[in-house]
Amino acid sequence: MTVLGWEDIQHLLSRHPNVVQDFYPEHAFDIPGLLNALRELPSGEDVRQLLEHVRRFAEIESVSNGAAANEAIWVRETFSESRDFGPALLGRSLGPADAVACPRLQEVDMTISQLRRGFFVRLVGGPGSGKSICAFQVGGELAASGWKVFRLRDTAVQNPFPLPTQSPALLLIDDAHLMGGGTLQRIEETADQRRMVLSVLNSVENGRIDRGAVLLDSKRAVKTIATALRADFQRTLTTVRRIDSDVGTNFLSEPLERRIEHAESTSDRPWQFCFVLGGGWKRSKEAADAARVAEADLVIAAAGMIQIASRDAPLSPNELQAFCRQHGMATEKVAKAIAWLVGQRLVLSEMDCRCPHQRFADNLPHEAEIFLTVTHHDKPAREMMSEVVFRNLGRIEKFSPRVACIVTKAAFAHVEAGKPIRLAQHGHCAWRFGAVIVSQLRRNAPA
């Protein structure tokens, strides 16, 4: 007797396929036909080519998906369109369309030189110093020489990758101080001859200046802008008159050269220069309405009152908060209001809470009247205002009638020094305040 294992049975069945067909037709198959089919399959070279086609298709699909995700994070900027500098005079956010219209800043050449040598640059400056427009001017010049410019759509994005793969490319990151330092460094580490990285940071006021950064000189930028606008007088006049009809060549109009000179002499940053050049104080009512909606109206009114009283002396946030607390305003609410006012460019910065021009402070209509009344009846606040005025009394040549009504003792001291109280200012005569001042002088200092 012979004992067969399963492997032996499999071997015998493979040697006699007819047995399988007779006894197990449901498991039978055409062995010769299968062999012929195998012989007809593609050869080794054909298989290699087929695999190469599959790999290429997978790469194309991956690039397509990556490009779609990339477009959601990075936006391609073009510099084909241009407009005048009217939006800058109104304090609007500027973009590529304003790169040509705004005077070219000196830091543009410095930034391009640094990019070509080191591939990535951090452009640093204070709020409203012209950083963004400088960056767009850099992008415009590189675009003109064949570079593609991509701007990060949102610096708050958690993952700015994948980066654009097209080259040569400039990656522009505005407000990069809002991005995590590690993320920015990872992007900068990818920079080379074909991919350059320009980041814009607002870091001067907190004392952080990165090594090798291009520091934008805001005061020099003001002089550069003023010089360029004078050189293109007719175009400048046309744009400024569209924003402020009081500027012109007529007898009763304010000459453009005088307005430019005043803006240059009183401004230490470009956005403040534009505010003055465009007569931004005339839009104080619109600003006050917006501040009221944001619950920042009393804070900006307080800033305006202190600015008038101090004759435009720097105003720290601590001094403004202390003044507001005298009227029962919570510190948190005041801090939030200051942050909103800085963002709207209704005060200079978080470190200097003055309005961009004293005329703006003097033309805050309803809110200033509220604080004038409250300050007059609130003894601690009145004493604080008196202290502010007395501290700056030597700088005051013509006393504001509103301030004279609040701090009469300082007004008396001012008159005793042989200096006047100004009733007429900015084209208006404050007769009501004048009557109050005369009455107080008659009652308290009849001589």
Image (cartoon, grey):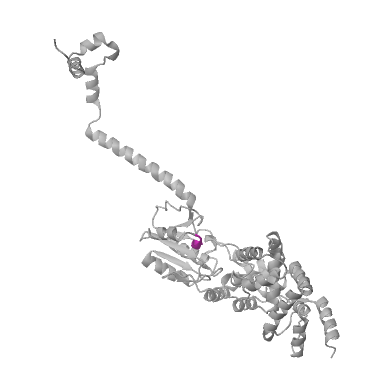
Relative image position of residue 446 (x, y in whole percent)? 85, 88
In this view, 191 is above or below 263: above
Does any portion of residue 277 appear in the rendered image?
no
Q: Quadrant of residue 271?
A: bottom right
Foreground pick, 66 / 206: 206
Q: Position of residue 286 (x, y in %)?
A: 70, 63
Image-based side of 244 in relation to 15, left or right: right
Looking at the image, how many numbered discs can be counted on the residues?
0
Residue 144 in which image quadrant: bottom left
Q: Is residue 310 above or below residue 57?
A: below
49 vs 210, nearest the viewer: 210
Q: Is residue 177 magenta?
A: yes
Q: Magenta residues?
A: 174-178
Residue 75, placed above or below residue 405: above
Q: Is residue 49 above or below residue 193?
A: above
The quadrant where residue 241 appears = bottom right
The C terminus: image quadrant: bottom right
Q: Residue furthest left?
A: 1
Q: Position of residue 27 (x, y in %)?
A: 28, 14
Quick check: can you spot residue 255? yes
Q: Is residue 65 magenta?
A: no
Percent x, y for residue 380?
74, 75
Left or right for 156, reference 292: left
For the point 72% across and 71% down, which residue is it? 363
Predominant SS along the magenta part: helix
- Identify which residue is drawn at 53% across, 68% down: 130
For residue 165, side relative to residue 421 (left or right): left
Which quadrant is home to the N terminus? top left
Say whether residue 18 is left or right of residue 87.
left
